[in-house]
Image: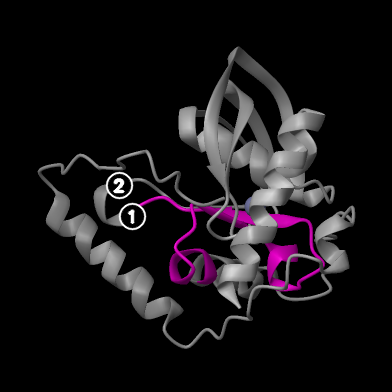
């Protein structure tokens, strides 16, 4: 998911910001040699496919390497989140960006699940790296109780709120081949498709 253009995303700088900044720099160094694939085009079949569970017993690829690719890609493409299939990788995993320099961790979520959602549904702007420049108003619950596996295979349960909850749910949809068009009413979907056609034409 991309940052809605209407939202100002500022972090709080804590007293140990310098140490945390060092951690951020360390993260940058760790990702320095990682090569990232290009985003697949919007009509790529992988974006419409339900992805299979990542098998930690018999991993098709090193999960730590996949995690590094996703973390580097989400920063480079300036997303809030990115799903593996958007990069042509057929794995059930996505990354959510934090800001380690100010103490907000990144998450790489393998085999993500939505245990439950809480709070009212909120209408908000949503963007997607696979449809750059298009923002659609989508209803999402305020909070999500998320369960996923870390790149080491440990099961993690976490509650995400607000924009992070929205982002988790958006990326979770990608795991099942669902894009943000699919969550819209018929009228809104048609309008969004028209807008996307215009944006695409301008990009050429
Ligand atoms: Zn997306």
Q: Nearer the viewer, residue 123 or 148?
A: 123
Q: Nearer the viewer, residue 172 or 65?
A: 172
Position of residue 170 measured from the top left corner of the image (x, y, whole percent): 65, 42
Q: Does residue 98 lie above or below 157 as drawn?
A: below
In the image: residue 70, left or right of residue 19: right
Q: Residue at x 75, y 50 (%)?
A: 174
Say which mark, if any, is on residue 100. 1
Position of residue 188 measured from the top left corner of the image (x, y, whole percent): 71, 33
Position of residue 154 measured from the top left corner of the image (x, y, whole percent): 67, 48
In the image: residue 121, left or right of residue 113: left
Helix, strand or loop under label 1 = helix
Say which mark, if any, is on residue 103. 2
Inter-mark Cα distance, 1 to 2? 5 Å
Ligand 1 lies under 8 Å from the Cβ of mark 2 = no
Name the image quarter holding the C terminus. bottom right
The magenta-colored residue range is: 73-99
Query: Contact (CB < 8 A) between labels 1 and 2?
Result: yes
């Amino acid at each position: 998911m991309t940052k809605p253009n209407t939202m100002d995303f500022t972090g709080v700088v804590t007293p140990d910001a310098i140490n945390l900044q060092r951690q951020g720099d360390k993260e940058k160094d760790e990702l320095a040699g990682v090569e990232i694939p290009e985003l697949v085009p919007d009509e790529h079949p992988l974006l419409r496919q339900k992805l299979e569970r990542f098998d930690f017993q018999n991993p098709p690829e090193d999960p730590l390497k996949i995690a590094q690719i996703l973390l580097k890609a989400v920063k480079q493409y300036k997303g809030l989140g990115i799903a593996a299939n958007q990069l042509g990788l057929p794995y059930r995993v996505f990354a959510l960006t934090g800001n380690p320099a100010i103490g907000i961790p990144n998450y790489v979520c393998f085999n993500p699940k939505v245990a439950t959602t809480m709070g009212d549904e909120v209408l908000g702007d949503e963007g997607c790296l696979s449809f750059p420049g298009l923002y659609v108003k989508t209803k999402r619950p305020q909070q999500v109780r998320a369960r996923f596996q870390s790149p080491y295979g440990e099961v993690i349960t976490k509650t995400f709120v607000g924009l992070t909850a929205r982002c988790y749910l958006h990326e979770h949809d990608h795991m099942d081949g669902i894009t943000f068009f699919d969550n819209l009413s018929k009228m809104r979907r048609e309008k969004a498709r028209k807008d996307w056609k215009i944006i695409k034409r301008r990009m050429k």
